[in-house]
Image (cartoon, rainbow, N blue to C red):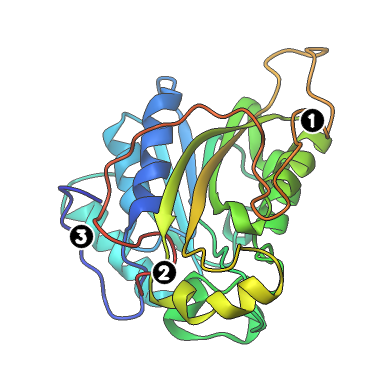
Amino acid sequence: MSGMLLLRPPGVYRPQNDTAMLAGALREARLPPGARVLELGTGTGAVAVAAAREGAGQVVAVDVSVRAVLAARVNARVRGLPVRVLRGDLFGPVRGEVFDVIVANPPYVVGHRDPAAVRGRGRAWEAGASGRAVLDRICRDAPGHLARHGTLLVVQSALSGAAATLVALRGAGLRASVVARRREPFGPVMLARAAELEARGLVRPGQRHEELLVIRGDLPSAAGEAVQTPLEGTRQDPRQGAGRTVRRTAVRGSAGGGGRHAA
């Protein structure tokens, strides 16, 4: 993220444009005083640090990587920020806890590798054939960890199916929409599998970019408040999976091919 110096050991995901998009969406969400914030897949802790700086009352960050956990702890501690960093798989370390805001930058790159078998830095982007190995779990489990009127913010590629995320969140009773999008050039990881993506019809011949999206889901603030039907507003380009109407948001981040690509 621009202007933030962070310790990043080998194998820990480097904050890129998707990180900056998520942090920007968190700022625009305007945390309520004393908000409890959870970051899933924290990496260096960049978004958790941003949440603490925004005035969150409690920040918890989770990552499956030992190196990421150590990096996030150091990055929060040197800034004097009270971030609790836990090692574990998604919601496992916070079972039974609820939060006002949950933020996530999960692996979302479409590929042929089994994410469960991946080790090292590839864990930060490998997301299986649909790109949804982790996204689907977040959509399924996040609503149960949101406090009343809580908010989920998740960043993903349009190639991994924005409509599927919107439908899943709305089916769980959240109001969900795409709140930011950014066109991103392919970096090394995506360029290496461009031919595979073309063969599957996920990108046009010669296309070497994708859209990164931030999707927001909100629990109703009162019992009986109207929520969207699961399919509302999810008509899409079959190659991109994005909703039709989206406010474009400019986000500052690292230069060059961001997302899960500039490995």
Q: Amino acid at mark 2?
A: His
Q: Quadrant of residue 182?
A: top left
Pointers 1 and 3 in contact (C-beta within 8 Å): no
Q: Earlier in the sequence, mark 1 or mark 2?
A: 1
Counting other residues with Cα less than 10 Å from the Cα at mark 2, is it few (<14), some (14-19), or many (20 or more)?
A: some
Relative to 153, does residue 111 appear above or below in the rendering? below
Q: Amino acid at mark 3?
A: Leu
Q: Is residue 142 left or right of residue 227?
A: left
The CA span between labels 1 and 3 is 37 Å
Relative to 154, does residue 246 appear above or below in the rendering? above
Residue 6: assigned label: 3
Whether residue 11 is visible to the viewer of this picture, yes or no, is: yes
Residue 173: assigned label: 1
Give the labeled residue for mark 2. 261
Percent of width and height locating residue 119: 51, 86
Q: Residue at x 48, y 40 (%)?
A: 181
The CA span between labels 2 and 3 is 19 Å
Q: Quadrant of residue 42?
A: bottom left
In the foreground, 67 or 259: 259
Q: Earlier in the sequence, mark 1 or mark 3?
A: 3
Percent of width and height locating residue 223: 79, 14
The CA span between labels 1 and 2 is 33 Å
Percent of width and height locating residue 76: 25, 52
Mark 1 or 2: in front is 2
Q: Earlier in the sequence, mark 2 or mark 3?
A: 3
Q: Is residue 143 left or right of residue 110?
A: right
Element class at badge 3: loop
